[in-house]
Amino acid sequence: MKTAMARPVTSFICQECGATHKKWAGRCDACGAWNTVVEEAPLSQGPGRGLGAAKGKTVPLTPLSTLEPPPPRTSSGLVEFDRVLGGGLVPGSAILVGGDPGIGKSTLLLQAASALARQGSHAIYISGEEASAQVRMRAHRLGLAEAPVRLGAETALRDILTTLDAEQPDLAVIDSIQTLWSDTVEAAPGSVSQVRASAHELVTFAKKRGVAIIIVGHVTKDGQIAGPRVVEHMVDTVLYFEGERGHQFRILRAVKNRFGPADEIGVFEMTGGGLAEVANPSALFLSERGQPSPGSAVFAGIEGTRPVLTEIQALVAPSTLASPRRTVVGLDSGRVSTILAVLEARCGIPFAGLDVFLNVAGGMRVNEPAADLAIAAALLSAREDSALPADCVTFGEISLSGALRPVAQAENRLKEAQKLGFSQAIIPASQKIEGAGGMRLDRITDLTSFVGEIFGAG
């Protein structure tokens, strides 16, 4: 008796966000985009399915205690770029770089490829968005015209892999993954299936041939890399190139790294001759800070393994609107709302009827909870029209009860502050400090004490 073959289940995939739907819809329920849901055929199951089919080969297993040497690394020639990667490029690694359009991704990678090629390595730059002549024009503008980088303009994935297999480079830059198309997938370039298939082929090639491949990815309006999230799981390292168009600072941030620490940052400055590395980002972020003024607080933060000092600016003004404005740039707006609620509930300082504006100077983004006390200090300074001391830094986490909680790496924060001329720090009372380095420490137990001791109110 013949058994009926199971009918393959057809899936409907949103080409904008990658969400899966059971049936076709004109509008994606996940991202809200219209006319982006496309039918996709399922992957073939193959002739042998189930435990009764032909057996595969045994996978070799090793003890967990097996010691292996660390992977070899090749310096790219850019110190800040190497810092984010964890010490340099690893052969056979796949790196995904995302960022807003025009932020400088192509400039950064062209500079990195040129610096690597000048050290004697073989670097190839494949552009799917620009012609080779356009890339050469950028290289002339950046002073990289004599760099021994091989250029190519192609979008066919099969031709790109054939070229890389013949050239065997040390580094290959693919700009960008959304422009590639594979002839094995019946979908338009940039679709979810094309991006997934192209990324899989590139990562597999990198592992088999030992070539370091850097893939450029577009981002959505929410700042996430466009396409399926599975691409971020395929690659070894995911980097985001951040920055505001109105600022010259650019931050290269690692959000995933199998060969180094995550959340590490590299700081660059956009100049007329390209991206310049910033060895001391704290001094750069505070370079334009003038005389002490109300609404300004210096936060001693940690980005990855390096301490970074940034200025948090606040402005509090009477509002004529029924719902006062809350404008936040460079900070978590939900965290700011929580701090405002704690100030009102625990300290009796209302912000109702007041517009609140918060900004991190220099285009930097601050995400760690250690910035809570600096945010509260900037808000109170702006509301009370009272400036904090010019030589004072602040850090500490605020709980919902108003208590101040200690944070990690306090010694490194204080060392960086002292190096830049700060002599006073406002920290939680329970913070353990092994060596303050001669800095005067003002230990605060809770937010109410902070309001009373620093601003003379409460």
Image: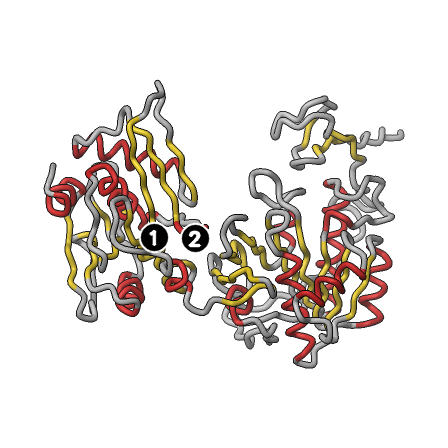
Kind of residue at badge 1: Glu
User: Does the CB distance between marks 2 and 1 fall below 8 Å?
Assistant: yes
Mark 2, residues whose alpha carbon is within 10 Å: few (<14), some, or many (≥20)?
many
What distance separates the C-alpha of mark 2 from that of mark 1? 8 Å
The tag on residue 284 is none
How many labels were placed on the picture?
2
Which quadrant is the C terminus positioned in?
Answer: top left
Kind of residue at badge 2: Gly
* Image-based side of 414 in relation to 14, left or right: left
Rendering quarter of residue 6:
top right
Q: Is residue 27 positioned above or below 282 on the image? A: above
Q: Can residue 253 be seen in this view?
A: no
* Image-based side of 20 in relation to 432, left or right: right
The tag on residue 362 is 2
Q: Tell me residue 192's x, y (percent).
A: 72, 41
Which quadrant is the N terminus positioned in?
Answer: top right
Residue farthest top in this picture: 322
Mark 1, residues whose alpha carbon is within 10 Å: few (<14), some, or many (≥20)?
many
Q: Is mark 1 on a helix, strand or loop?
A: strand
For the residue pair 291 and 360, the one nearer the viewer reads as: 291
The tag on residue 311 is 1
Q: Earlier in the sequence, mark 2 or mark 1?
A: 1
Q: What element carries label 2?
A: helix
